[in-house]
Image (cartoon, rainbow, N blue to C red):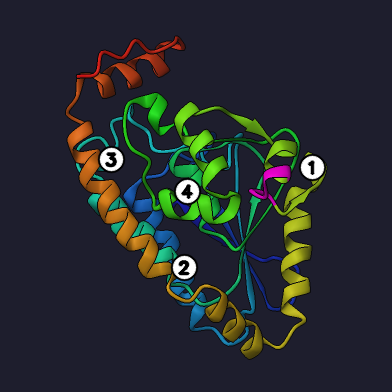
């Protein structure tokens, strides 16, 4: 089953990809592999100068699904999922994320993998890993502080708090805030503005600005995976996932 659709954007030189695993668009290995394959294909298309990543349903992506029957590898060994996630950072063309709803956990990692984020006040952002009982992943230990600084990244990680679009804009996590029903159109307009610039110059400038980023994120992610594989076996992780499903505060025991 396809998780990513390529849609006519209505703008010259702009590609539109839509996540179709609604309503919550939980991330799994198959979805990320398909997305990375689309980005690789678009890198090879001379007519494509910018890409928008949007999503159907209520959320942009509510994270990895620990409670479904999907074999996404996250609750055992996140390596296969992360192998696909790391491919996203090696794409060559500007990527704008249209974040109309929740971007949580791995969903936040997916949003942060884009160059720019267009969102709305109603959206919610959360790096809720510690609240679930384990170390952040998806390379967020490298990418989040690159956007908001180490101090704010630590605050978001340690508390797992959810912030709205206005706070995300203040922190620099979001680049543009618009009414909820204009998120996708505004993301497409931004991508179209980028596409007006010389594509060789844009791609070269992007490569300069992101020099070393993919390698740094991959190295951070190797460490994230090692720690997560240990913590996935703890009682605290089981309690964190259980508490989330039961909508209550977790009771961690340091074991």
Quickly name the residue at label 3.
74
Kindly indicate whether the residue at mark 2 contacts the one at mark 4 (C-beta within 8 angstroms).
Answer: no
- In the rendered image, the quadrant that contains the C terminus is top left
Q: Is residue 90 left or right of residue 50?
A: left
Of the image marks 1 and 4, the number of the one nearer the N terminus: 4
As helix, strand or loop, the secondary structure at mark 4 comes to: helix
Q: Nearer the viewer, mark 4 or mark 2?
A: 4
Kindly indicate whether the residue at mark 4 contacts the one at mark 3 (C-beta within 8 angstroms).
Answer: no
Q: Nearer the viewer, residue 1 or 12?
A: 12
Kindly indicate whether the residue at mark 4 contacts the one at mark 1 (C-beta within 8 angstroms).
Answer: no
Mark 2 Cα within 10 Å, few/some/many (few <14, many 20+)?
Answer: some
Residue 49 lies, with reference to residue 145, above or below; the image says: below
Q: Nearer the viewer, mark 2 or mark 3?
A: 3
Task: Write down the quadrant of residue 57 in the picture.
Answer: top right
Q: Is residue 103 left or right of residue 34?
A: right
The location of residue 40, given as percent across then percent down, is 44, 74
Q: Is residue 246 a member of the stretch shown in magenta?
A: no
Residue 192 lies, with reference to residue 105, above or below; the image says: below
Q: Is residue 111 left or right of residue 193?
A: left
- In this picture, which residue range is highlighted in magenta? 170-174
Kindly indicate whether the residue at mark 1 contacts the one at mark 2 (C-beta within 8 angstroms).
Answer: no
Residue at x-position 82% and y-position 42%: 179
Quickly name the residue at label 2.
38
């Amino acid at each position: 089953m396809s998780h990513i659709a390529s849609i006519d954007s209505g703008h010259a030189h702009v590609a539109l990809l839509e996540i179709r695993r609604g309503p919550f668009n939980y991330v799994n290995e198959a979805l990320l592999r398909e997305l990375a394959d689309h980005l690789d294909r678009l890198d090879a298309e001379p007519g494509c100068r910018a890409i928008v990543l949007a999503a159907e349903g209520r959320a942009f992506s509510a994270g990895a699904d620990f409670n479904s029957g999907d074999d996404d590898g996250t609750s055992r060994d996140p390596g296969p999922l992360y192998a696909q996630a790391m491919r996203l950072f090696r794409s060559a063309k500007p990527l704008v994320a249209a974040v109309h709803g929740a971007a949580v956990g791995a969903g936040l990692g997916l949003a942060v993998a884009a160059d720019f984020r267009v969102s709305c006040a109603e959206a919610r952002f959360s790096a809720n890993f510690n609240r679930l009982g384990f170390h952040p992943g998806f390379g967020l230990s490298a990418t989040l502080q690159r956007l908001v600084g180490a101090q704010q990244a630590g605050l978001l990680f340690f508390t797992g708090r959810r912030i709205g679009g206005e706070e995300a804009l203040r922190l620099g996590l979001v680049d543009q805030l618009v009414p909820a029903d204009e998120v996708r159109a505004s993301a497409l307009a931004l991508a179209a503005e980028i596409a007006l610039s010389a594509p060789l110059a844009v791609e070269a400038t992007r490569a300069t600005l992101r020099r070393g980023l993919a390698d740094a994120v991959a190295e951070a992610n190797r460490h994230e995976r090692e720690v997560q594989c240990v913590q996935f076996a703890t009682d605290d992780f089981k309690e964190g996932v259980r508490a989330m499903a039961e909508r209550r505060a977790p009771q961690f025991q340091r074991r």
